[in-house]
Image (cartoon, rainbow, N blue to C red):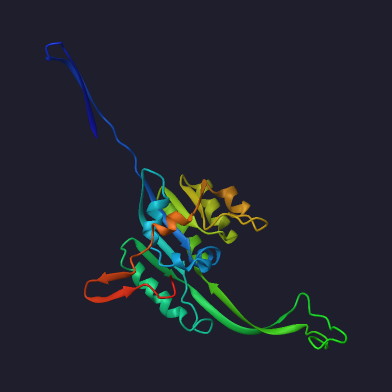
Amino acid sequence: MIACYRSKSRKGEILSGFCVSAVWAVMRAIFYIDGFNFYYLRTRGQPQFKWLNMKALADNIVRAGTVVHKVKYYTAPVSVKIDPGAPARQQALFSALRTVPEIEICQGRFLYSEKWARLVHPPKAKPNSYVWSLPGPDVVYVTKTEEKGSDVNLGVHLVRDAFLDLFDVAYVITNDTDLVEPIRIVTQETSKQVCIVAPCRPRRGGAPIPAPSLLNVSSFVHYIDDRELANSQFPPVINRAGKAPVTKPATWV
């Protein structure tokens, strides 16, 4: 932008003048979203916010003068063994996200297993009770689900993108302390900033959010609020050129 300044006489004649060229720096931002961490801390209990346009959320979060040119969403295909309808709902969200050019879905692995696990506090027998009259078991057979690869992928991509100078500021949506070291490398060994985007505010008596170790290595923090989520939803039906429309799952009211 060029701004020109001129002095005039009372008759309107230009007596002197000069021009100044001004350049306003634009901050380049990339969002890194820890999908399962965000789900368990925020949207699992608020299904009305699950139909989320993550690029719109990023635009609603960043500070003035910042342009989001990439949103990376780290997740894994969910298992039908936990919820038969979950994979179809997840694929609907993936299809919606793929309509936004700036969003990249980075998939890890979702592991399901059944195994014996030892109880920390086995139940005790209650004499003369019809409810529990036998000694309690020390172990029980349980199902276990694990998401593998997403935190590693997010951390590696964050460090790589910083050293390739692909952003000026990174926004990381997580409360996973496994990401402390990648974030520390970016904030302390490069000229980049990292904002920890907390999925929610801490509940009274609950664990700190963000975790203190994440706060110690971050540049600043932002808490997602309901208004930002509500203003970042996809429309109920998304029309696609040459493809069938994508419809919001009915259970996500």
Q: At 51% from the left edge and 70% from the top edge, which residue is drawn? A: 149
* Quadrant assignment, res 6: top left
* Quadrant assignment, res 53: bottom left
User: Where is residue 64 shown, x and y percent of the image?
Assistant: 38, 43
In this view of the protein, can residue 166 be seen by the observer?
Answer: no
Front residue (pair 199, 174): 199
Q: Is residue 223 above or below residue 21?
A: below
Q: At 57% from the left edge and 49% from the top edge, which residue is drawn? A: 217
Q: Is residue 136 above or below residue 33?
A: below
User: Where is residue 174 shown, x and y percent of the image?
Assistant: 53, 59
User: Where is residue 77 shown, x and y percent of the image?
Assistant: 46, 76
User: In the image, 180: left or right of 13?
Assistant: right
Q: What quarter of the picture does the N terminus occupy?
A: top left
User: Where is residue 87 shown, x and y percent of the image?
Assistant: 44, 79
Name the residue furthest right: 127
User: In the image, 204: left or right of 228?
Assistant: right
Q: What quarter of the picture does the C terminus occupy?
A: bottom left
In this view of the protein, can residue 136 be seen by the observer?
Answer: yes
Q: At 37% from the left edge and 72% from the top edge, which residue is drawn? A: 248
Q: At 30% from the left edge and 67% from the top edge, which residue is drawn? A: 99
Count of numbered tags: 0
User: In the image, 182: left or right of 249?
Assistant: right
